[in-house]
Image: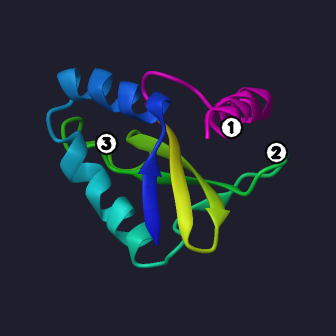
Amino acid sequence: MDVEYSEAFKRQLKRLSRRYRQIKKDIKPIVDALIADKTPGDQIIGTIYTLYKVRAKNSDRKRGKSGGYRIIYYLKTDTKCILITLYSKTDQGDITSSKLNSLLTDIETNA
């Protein structure tokens, strides 16, 4: 599967990597699973797109997955997915469906 990164995801990764030095290593298993045609995480209900949310541990905080990162990705086709956003659960609560829909609308219009 082809994995692409949205601009919002890249910005969040850059911002979080300043504080959490191990973040790229922590999210690598999820990206590898997506490349291997797996769909980790749980599907997000309430959006018009096929979105999944997956938890990743934060090695810098030693809190496991519950206090780690959340990655939202979009299965665009059977062979392509887009990593939409990334956030630390300790910094931010859940993202609303309307926010996710607006992020995806921006991606679709820029594609």
Looking at the rendered structure, the kind of residue marked 3 is Arg
N-terminal-most mark, 1 or 2: 2
* Residue at the image position 44 percent from the left and 35 percent from the top: 9
Q: Residue at x 77, y 51 (%)?
A: 49
Q: Residue furthest left?
A: 21
Name the residue tied to disc 2.
47
Residue 100 is inside the magenta segment: yes
Density class for disc 2 (Cα within 10 Å; few <14, some 14-19, many ≥20) is some
Label 1 vs label 2, nearer the camera: 1
The answer, for residue 88, to whether it is visible in the render is: no
Please give the residue where the numbered disc 1 appears in the rendered image: 104
- Rendering quarter of residue 105: top right
Contact (CB < 8 A) between labels 1 and 2? yes
Which of the two discs, 3 and 1, labels the residue nearer the N terminus? Answer: 3
Magenta stretch in the rendered image: 87-111
Mark drawn on residue 63: 3
Above or below 53: residue 22: above
Q: CA distance from mark 3 to mark 1?
A: 30 Å
Specify whether 91 is left or right of 27. right
- The disc labelled 1 sits on which kind of residue? Leu
Residue 87, placed above or below residue 92 = below
Viewed as shown, does residue 39 lie left or right of 94?
A: left
